[in-house]
Image (cartoon, rainbow, N blue to C red):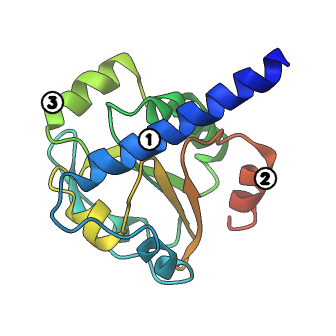
Amino acid sequence: MLKSSKDNFLNKLIRLYLLLSLLLVTSVSAQPPSPYAVEKLSGQKAPDFTLKDLNGNDVSLSLFKGKVVLLNFWATWCPPCKAEIPSMNKLQQMFENKGLIILAVSTDKAVVDVKDFIKNNPVNFKVVVDYNLKVSRLLYKVFMIPTTFLIDKKGVIVKKYFGEQDWTEPDIIKDIETLL
């Protein structure tokens, strides 16, 4: 009985978080993307973009042509985003010599916030900042964070993941290994 009420509370908490995440993300733009708009990207070529990394260098998705890319949209204020960083670090470590690139697109407004966050939560993958949300909203139709796209070597979006993931989970590892 106790487990049931605890699970019920956890489910309500997750729903509340998703709703708040959706509200926060949609409050930034006059025309937020529809949750259904992201579905049209499946099987399509991933839209190319160029954003600045934490050192001010341009990073384009097209730089990783011929590689499998895990494109993750996140923010420093997002608890599930923070929670999945350790498993993303492990995933990068597992596949760094096999052709996997993890590219994390922060939706924060200020680079300094992301730099401060990374100091306390080190990552071993590339981080860029989409401070005006043009890439996340307009190109990738991200309506909640974290949202992650798995892109094959041809640049096609083959899978989407919504919410926090354990990136070392066997099914996810299998998804990636089949593309490498």
- Near mark 2 (Cα within 10 A), the count class, few <14, some 14-19 or many ≥20, is few
Between tags 1 and 2, which lies in front?
Answer: 2
Which quadrant of the figure contains the C terminus? bottom right
Q: Which is more N-terminal, label 2 or label 1?
A: 1
Amino acid type of the residue that numbered disc 1 sits on in the rendered structure: Phe
**Dot 2: what SS?**
helix
Whether residue 87 is visible to the viewer of this picture, yes or no, is: yes
Q: Which residue is mark 1?
A: 125
Compute the Cα span from label 1 to label 2: 21 Å
Binning the other alpha carbons within 10 Å of mark 1 as few (below 14), some (14 to 19) or many (20 upward) gives some
Specify whether residue 89 is in view: no
| Residues at circles 1 and 3 in contact by the CB criterion of under 8 Å | no
- Name the residue: 26% across, 71% down: 138
Q: Which residue is mark 3?
A: 112
x then y, percent, for residue 51? 21, 57
Quarter of the image where one finds residue 37 = bottom left
Element assignment for label 1: loop
Where residue 143 appears, as percent x and y from the top left, is 38, 59
Q: Pointer 2: what residue?
A: 171
Q: Residue at x 58, y 56 (%)?
A: 161
In terms of depth relative to the viewer, which is nearer, 24 or 148? Answer: 24
- Name the element at disc 3: helix
Residue 46 quadrant: bottom left
- Kindly identify which numbered label has been placed on residue 54: none
Residue 40, how many percent across, how many down?
48, 82
Q: Say what amino acid the circle numbered 3 marks.
A: Val
Q: Earlier in the sequence, mark 3 or mark 2?
A: 3
Mark 1–mark 3 Cα distance, whole angstroms, equals: 18 Å
Tell which of 150 and 140 is nearer to you: 140
